[in-house]
């Protein structure tokens, strides 16, 4: 059945959907944010470490995406997913080892940073991120099937990844980077949350208790609304507390992207074919808000020197 469906589908579009190039902003944004805040606070920036960390993060995310396809193929939840890499290649073993190659290459990059700094802290944090990534979908844990994926995602791509990026530049931690990681963690978790709306029936059939299965699409759309607004509320709060520079209010320029996402999900939350692209609207929001956030810290640094 899979072979027939793939034959009748535009192969290029399926591969693009499987590789999900826009989704790699999820790996880029925490590294960018932590590194830029480090520059803002110390006026120092090691471009070599930044680029090595960025490439490593992308490779580790590739491992997570590929291994998740492998683990999902074992539960049968992806049997109707034409753009699963396992379904496209028909070779689960190949995808599994390709993912492990990406993971190994990414960890080698982090090891190079560790050797460079003679400090294992960044390696330890990233290994913890990898552990959270594995227990999300990997057996015997599969915590994503219990509806805990968004929580794991928040910590892995928020506080942990941003802290690691900041530490890679300064070999210390900061209150500002920790507060900033909340914003990045929320916008990243929103992407994962949005990926459930169109596949609630498949998730339920496979025994996956995703947040949308638990809440229903109507309540889920309300949760999405307030989660998205919380990004702006936290920004204002941290500016008032003088943890963020005033320039971070620039993030409000991303509001049109937030409203487009909110209105789209509110309108089509119970129509799988129409709501299926909401995760890409969430990626747009994540990317634009993250870039504006990073620019704000650069502006703050330039105006205070």
Image (cartoon, rainbow, N blue to C red):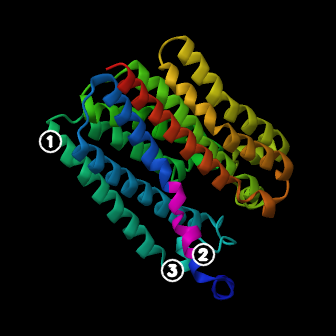
- Inspect this view and state whether residue 152 appears: no
Instruction: Name the residue beneath numbered marker 2.
Output: 14
Q: Nearer the viewer, residue 96 or 248?
A: 248
Could you tell me what secondary structure mostly forms the magenta stretch?
Answer: helix
Residue 112 in the image: state x and y as whole percent. 19, 48
Assign a secondary structure to mark 3.
helix
Residue 284 in the image: state x and y as whole percent. 60, 50
Vertical placement of residue 151 versus 100, above or below: above
Q: Please give the name of the residue rendered at 66% of the width and 70% of the height, measured from the top-left corner.
A: 81
Of pointers 2 and 3, the one earlier in the residue sequence: 2
Vertical placement of residue 35 versus 99, above or below: above
- Inspect this view and state whether residue 228 appears: yes
Q: Which mark is residue 89?
A: 3
Residue 46 painted magenta: no
Vertical placement of residue 286 versus 23, above or below: above
Of pointers 1 and 3, the one earlier in the residue sequence: 3
Of pointers 1 and 2, the one earlier in the residue sequence: 2
CA gap, disc 1 and disc 2: 40 Å
Assign a secondary structure to mark 1.
helix
CA gap, disc 1 and disc 3: 39 Å
Quick check: marks 1 and 2 in contact, CB under 8 Å? no
Instruction: Name the residue beneath numbered marker 1.
Output: 116
Residue 129 in the image: state x and y as whole percent. 41, 42
Total marks shown come to 3
The magenta-colored residue range is: 13-23
Residue 277 in the image: state x and y as whole percent. 70, 59
Position of the N terminus, as image quadrant, is bottom right
Label 3, residues with CA under 10 Å away: few <14, some 14-19, many ≥20: few
């Amino acid at each position: 059945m899979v072979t027939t469906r793939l034959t009748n589908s535009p192969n290029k579009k399926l591969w693009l959907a499987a590789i999900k190039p826009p989704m790699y902003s999820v790996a880029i944004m925490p590294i960018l944010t932590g590194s830029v805040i480090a520059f803002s606070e110390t006026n120092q920036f090691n471009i070599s470490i930044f680029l090595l960390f960025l490439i490593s993060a992308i490779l580790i995310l590739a491992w997570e995406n590929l291994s998740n396809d492998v683990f999902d193929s074992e539960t049968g939840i992806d049997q109707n997913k034409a753009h699963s890499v396992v379904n496209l290649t028909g070779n689960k073993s190949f995808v599994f080892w390709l993912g492990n190659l990406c993971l190994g290459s990414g960890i080698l990059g982090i090891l190079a940073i560790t050797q460079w700094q003679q400090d294992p802290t960044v390696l330890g944090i990233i290994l913890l991120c990898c552990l959270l990534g594995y227990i999300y979908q990997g057996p015997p844990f599969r915590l994503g099937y219990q509806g805990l994926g968004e929580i794991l995602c928040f910590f892995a791509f928020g506080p942990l990844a941003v802290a690691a990026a900041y530490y890679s530049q300064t070999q210390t931690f900061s209150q500002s980077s920790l507060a900033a990681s909340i914003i990045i963690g929320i916008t990243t978790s929103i992407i994962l949350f949005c990926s459930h709306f169109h596949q609630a029936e498949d998730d339920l059939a496979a025994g996956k208790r995703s947040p949308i299965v638990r809440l229903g699409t109507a309540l889920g759309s309300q949760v999405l609304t307030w989660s998205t607004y919380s990004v702006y509320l936290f920004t204002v709060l941290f500016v008032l507390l003088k943890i963020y520079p005033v320039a971070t209010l620039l993030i409000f320029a991303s509001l049109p992207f937030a409203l487009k996402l909110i209105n789209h999900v509110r309108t089509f939350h119970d129509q799988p074919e129409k709501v299926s692209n909401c995760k890409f609207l969430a990626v747009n929001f994540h990317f634009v808000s993250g870039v504006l956030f990073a620019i704000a810290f650069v502006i703050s640094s330039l105006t205070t020197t």
